Image (cartoon, rainbow, N blue to C red):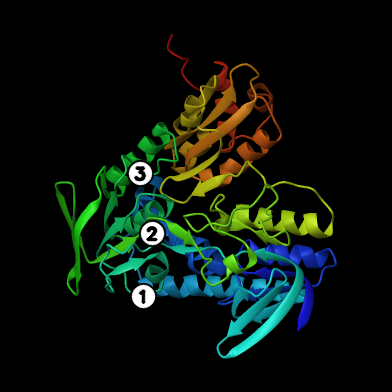
Amino acid sequence: MEKFDLIVIGAGPGGYPAAIRAAQLGASVAIVEREVPGGTCLNWGCIPTKTLIASAEFADQFRHAETLGFKAAAPQIDYPALIRRKNEVVAQLSGGVASLLKANGVKWFHGTASFLTRNQINVANGSINTVLEAAHTIIATGSTSTMPGFLPRHSRVVESRSFLDLTRLPASVIILGGGVIGCEFACLLARLGVQVTLVEMLSDILLILDEDVRRELRQVFEKKLKIRILTGAPLTDITASDEGVSGKAGDQTVSAELMLVAIGRRPVTAELNLAGIGIQTTPAGHIPVDAQGRTRAATVFAVGDVNGGPQFAHAATRQGVIIAENLFAKSRTAFDSLVPSCIFTDPEVGCVGLTEAQAKEQNRAIKVGKFTFAHLGKALASGHPGGFVKWIADAATDRLLGAQAVGSHATELIAEATLAIRGEYTAQELGRTIHSHPTLSEAWMEAAHALHGTCVHAPPRRS
């Protein structure tokens, strides 16, 4: 039986950084993974979808080339070629993770892990079982797509991972679920010429965002991308056959060649034997942890989607690194509460910190400063004048509490807002910080000025 200082279960964005950081700090580390390096994010989530989105963006730019002074024929989409490129990008990055683990002396074990005791783990690989022992264990098994029982089991009803394996682009798709995954796929497919119907049983898509951001998104979805959006009623009477899929949303009948199910994800914990070491999961299947990721079993930690925190790869990575440093560098760092989120729709969305809706729920006095890209030179010059950024600040102290951006490159722009909020900047300080011209990031400076009514590049507020 091999012994280690740390065993990490799962080689996704929460697991492999934790393993590497622990090894950098001198720990002997093993990592157990039943599939391939990189986990869901790299192989069947973030990276493959963003690779396809990049191709779809190029097709969209080609289609609207005349607005920038070029005449070009409509692009012919070679979807199998897009899939090959996606697979090549994934393979390169997954191979890179494997190389990094090896270079840092992390020992790889392929198989399914389950706890024998709090410090002993069995790794099952076919008929071969290997028992490992460690002083500490990090669970980083992630999550998988939810496929509820009311849906018909048919090849034309797929979740995101299965969809990414398709080599033929369907002519029409029903997307069930108006959250982040559903909306990203809706935009991706619409840009590639697919007829998309998006069904969300709640009152609107992406309810995690403020109303003005959602309104901007929905306008582009429906007017530019021609996405049919049905909200406020569940999809019922669902049938699937070799001819296609159909159902009813309220009084609307919908049908398509394929259905993509994007109604949430559930944590992967079933095979870990957590009950055997005294860990009870929540009703949703998550592993409860404290502010430093420790479970009820003192030597066992959990990071990422599996612990019920923010479902972002970057959050899982940070959590994994924090645990490694707390264990082997004797730090006492808690998990970060400020986590930015990025949505790769058309237009993109970035947000961090407090939203206006949350401030209202908390009865908190705030000030809001907003600046539209239509008043920004770089946005107009690049042909992307839609959208805006906005700051939310404490009304008494002027301290920045939250930010949202919707528009071109919003997923890149949100990093500045995250740093400003983390650094406890005031809107006045941010507004006095010189931003290069002409850039999209100037929008943050302008929005900070707008919060105080001193913005010189936007019409004055109405009294």
Give neighbour class at mark 2: few <14, some 14-19, many 20+ (Cα, 10 Å): some
Locate residue 421: give its quadrant.
top right
What quarter of the picture does the N terminus occupy?
bottom right
Give neighbour class at mark 1: few <14, some 14-19, many 20+ (Cα, 10 Å): some
Locate residue 416: give its quadrant.
top right
Label 3: element kind: loop
Give neighbour class at mark 3: few <14, some 14-19, many 20+ (Cα, 10 Å): many
Give the farthest residue toward the bottom.
127
Which residue position is annotated with label 2? 59
Total labels drawn: 3
334 and 429: which is toward the camera: 334
- Under mark 2, the amino acid is Ala
Which residue position is annotated with label 1? 167
In front: label 1 or label 3:
3
In-image side of 308 versus 154 (left or right): right
- Under mark 1, the amino acid is Thr
Numbered mark located on residue 205 in the image: 3
* Spatial separation of the CA atoms under disc 1 and disc 3: 28 Å
113 and 251: which is toward the camera: 113
Numbered mark located on residue 4 in the image: none
